[in-house]
Image (spheres, helix red, strand yellow):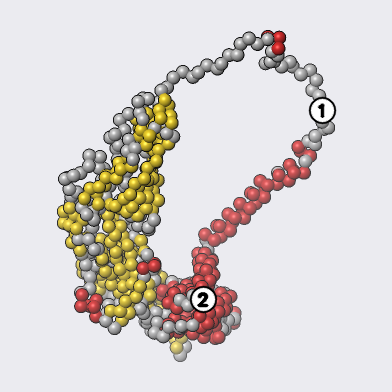
Amino acid sequence: MRFTLKTLVLLLAIALLAPTAGAAAFTATLDRDALTLGESATLALTFVGGSPGNVPTPNVDGLQFIQIGTSRNINIVNGAMSSTITISFSVQPQREGEFTIPALTADVGGQPLTTEPLKIKISKPSAPSAEAVNSGNEIAFLKLIFPKLKMFTGESAVMRLDLFLREEVQPAGNFQLNSANHDGFSTGKTVELPDQRHRVQIGSHIFNVIPLSIPLTAVKTGAYPLGPFTASLIIIIPNGPFGEQRQITLTTEAVNVETLPLPAENRPANFNGAIGEFTLTATAGPTTVTVGDPVTVRVQISGSGTMDTLTLPTQTAWQNFKTFPPTAKLETSDPLGFRGQKTFEQIVSPLNADVHELPPVTFPFFNPNDSQYHTLTQAAVPLTVRAAGASPLPNVVGNKNAAEEKPVADIFPIKESLGKIDGKAVPLIAQPKFLALQTVPVLALLAAFVWRQRTDNLANNPRLRRRRAVAQLVHGGTSDLNKFATENKSDEFFAMLFRLLQEQLGERLDCPATAITEADVDQRLIRLGISPATLQSLHELFQFCNQARYAPIQTRQELAAIAIKFKKTVGELQEVKA
C-alpha cells in the first residue's frame, strides 16, 4: 500500500517521541577471515541506535578497502524504535600474509564507540589436488592443457585453459586471468571458443567445461615452467531464492616445457625465421616492359605458423633488378591467427635489356613437425625487356598542294556582341529557399541547447541513468528470453532471467543487485506500494530459477509462459514510483 501524508506524520512523531530500544552500539564484522590472492571479503560496519558522526575507513598496508554500499533498517517494537545503519567495504588483498584490521572509532548518537580488532589471513592460491578434482567435490577448478613438452625457439602453439564449473553453479562474468608464470614465452590474447563447450561427469557431479585458448610463442632457449596460471571469477551458487554470489580464485598446475634452438645444419642462406608449414604461389606482370619500367611481383604464402611475423626473404637471384620494399596483407582463417594466407606485393624493374626472365621466387621455412628446413620455389617468369631510347619522330607527308591546306586559327577574335540576355533573375534575398536556409543554424542551436540540458540533467541524476540502463537491459534481455525459449535452451534462459530480476530489483530499491535478500525485498517493496500479486509473481519467478538447477524445464511452451510472466511482472514493477 502507499503511504499517505497522515501516515508519514505519524511515523515521524513516533520516531521523535518513542524511546529507543537500547543503547548505541558500533561493531565491525568480516564475512570471511581467510582468503586467497584474487578473492575479496566484505567488511560491515554496523551502527545501532543513531547515525554515525563519522565513518572510519580502515588503513592496512597490503589491503585495499573500497566502500560498496549503505543500508538502513528501522524497527518499532512495543513503541520502542531502533535504527541500524550498515556500511559495507570490499576488502581486496594485495599480497599474502596475516593482517589485523585495527580497532575503529566512531561517534554514534553523541557517544564515542570503538570496535574490536579483526584478523584476516591471505594465502597464495594453489591448484586443488588430483584426489579433490577426481572426487567431483570441487565447485570449480581450472586445468592447463599444453600437449607440447618440447618446442623450437620461435615456434608457436596453442595453450588451453579449461574452466570446469559444476552444473548447479552459474558464472556471473568478470573472468580475469590475474597472473601467470610464462618466462621464456610470449602470449597473445585469450580467446573463448563457444563451439567447443561441453559437459563431463566427474565423480557423481556433472561439470560444464568452458575452453579458453591462448596463443603462445617460445622466445628463449632452455627449460622453463609454464604456469601456474591464476584467475578470478564471480559465480552464483544455490543459496535461498536469490542465490549467493561469490568471488573465487582458481589456479592451475605448472607444466615444464623445453625450448630448443633451431638447427644450424642445412639452414638455407636466405632463411629469415619462418616457422610452420606453408605453400607458395607467385605471379608477375606485365611481362613486356622497357628497361626501368615496373614489374609487380605478387607472392602468396598460405599455411599455418607464425603468420603475423612472416616476411618475404631476400631474393639473391634478382641481381639484375632494382627492388623496392614489399607491402603485405594478412588474412587469417582462425581466431588465434595461426592459419591463413599472407600476400606480398613487390615492385621490381629490370636494369638492362639483357634480362629475359624474372628468376624463381624462393621461400625457405623450418617445419617443427619433422624438424627439417624446406624451401618452396616458384618457376621463373619469362620477360621481354626492350632497350630504352628516344621516342620516334612522327612521319612527315610531302608533295601536298599548299593551296589545298586550310589554315587553322589558333587565336579567336574578341566577341563584340554579348548576345541575347535572359530575363531578370530573382535576387537571392527574395528566394524562399534562401530564406528557409537561414533558419537552419537557429534550429541547430536550439537543438544543441536542448540536448545539452538533457545531458546535464542526466549527468546529475545517477538514479535516472541507472533506470534507463536497466530498462534497456531488460528490453534486450526479454528478447533473449524469447529466443532461448524458442530454441529450448533452459540453462541460458534461467541464467538470463535471474540476472534481469536482480538488476530490476536493485534499480527499484536503489541498492546493488548483489546485496538483495528475500526479507529485504519483501519489506521494501511493500513500502513502495507494490501489489501482493506482483510480489507473489516475483517469488514464483525466483523459485523457477532455483528449481531449474535441479529439475530443468524441458518444453518450449513452459519457457515461453515464464517469459510472458516475467514481462508482465517487470512491467508492473517499473510502474511503481521508487
Q: How crowded is mark 2: few (under 14 residues within 10 Å), some or many (20 or more)?
A: some
Residue type, label 1: Ile
Which label is found at residue 421? 1
- Residue pictured at 29% horizontal, 34% vertical: 317
In the rendered structure, the answer to whether residue 167 lies left or right of residue 96 reads: right
Which picture quadrant has residue 66? bottom left
- Residue pictured at 43% horizontal, 71% vertical: 512
Which label is found at residue 108? none
39 or 385, which lies in front?
385
- Residue pictured at 39% horizontal, 84% vertical: 550
Which picture quadrant has residue 8? bottom right
Quarter of the image that includes the N terminus: bottom right
Question: At which x and y percent is residue 14?
Answer: 50, 83
Decide if residue 302 is in sight here. yes
Question: At which x and y percent is residue 163?
Answer: 31, 70
In the rendered structure, the answer to whether residue 527 lies left or right of residue 83 reads: right
In the rendered structure, the answer to whether residue 312 lies left or right of residue 132 reads: right
Decide if residue 3 is in sight here. no
Residue placed furthest toward the front: 399
Please tell me how many numbered marks the rendered image carries.
Answer: 2
Quarter of the image that includes the C terminus: bottom right
Residue type, label 2: Thr
Which residue lies under the disc numbered 2?
Answer: 486
From what the image shows, is residue 152 above or below residue 114?
above
120 or 108, which lies in front?
120
57 or 49, which lies in front?
57
Which picture quadrant has residue 59? bottom left
